[in-house]
Amino acid sequence: MTAETPENHPLVPTQGSETMPPVVAATLCVAVKADGSPCRSRPQPSSAYCWFHDPALAERRSEVGRMAAATSHRRTCLTPGSKAPQLQSAEDVRTLLSEIVHQLRTGVIDRATANGLTYACQIALRTIDARDLQRRIEALETAAKARR
């Protein structure tokens, strides 16, 4: 009895047969990156290059870059002369957070700006809590001194 190897086994299809198409030679982009290493991206369906290296897509890549640059400069900032909100209480922070959510949902500010403002609100709330705690401690110390 002879051992059958995968190459001559009757149930293993061979390359080029009807059940197994020939292996495509370029499964990765053929471009070489600036550091000299080969590109590891998959090529476009009808090209040997990926989207980033295909010379036929150079104009489209430039167009996409211009569009991205144009939208990144559209971030909404405060207009000159606008008043900063005074965050003196937890209620002030809650009101500001409500405004941030509303502005985010209506597209007035973007998500990154809303994230930054929300983080600032967290810090403000911690500061308010620490200030209130300090005031309570001082009041208790004053009351304790008065009882002596």
Image (cartoon, rainbow, N blue to C red):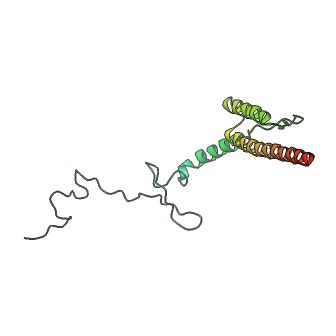
Q: Is residue 42 above or below residue 109?
A: below
Q: Is residue 98 above or below residue 65?
A: above
Identify the image quadrant of the N terminus.
Answer: bottom left
Which of the 4 quarters of the picture holds residue 5?
A: bottom left
Would residue 94 appear left or right of 42 to someone viewing this image? right
Q: From the viewer's side, name the closer residue of 80 and 137.
A: 137
| Residue positioned 68% across, 28% down in the render | 106
Which of the 4 quarters of the picture holds residue 93?
A: top right
Q: From the viewer's side, name the closer residue of 5 and 118.
A: 118
Q: Is residue 113 above or below residue 40?
A: above
Would residue 85 appear left or right of 28 to someone viewing this image? right
| Residue positioned 60% across, 47% down in the render | 61
| Residue positioned 41% across, 57% down in the render | 27
| Residue 86 image offset from top left, x and y in percent | 85, 36
| Residue 35 image offset from top left, x and y in percent | 59, 67
Tally the marks.
0
Residue extending furthest toward the left: 1
Residue 108 shows up from this direction: no
| Residue 141 image offset from top left, x and y in percent | 87, 48
Q: From the viewer's side, name the closer residue of 29 and 138.
A: 138
Residue 16 shows up from this direction: yes
Residue extending furthest toward the bottom: 2
| Residue positioned 63% across, 43% down in the render | 63
| Residue 3 image offset from top left, x and y in percent | 13, 69
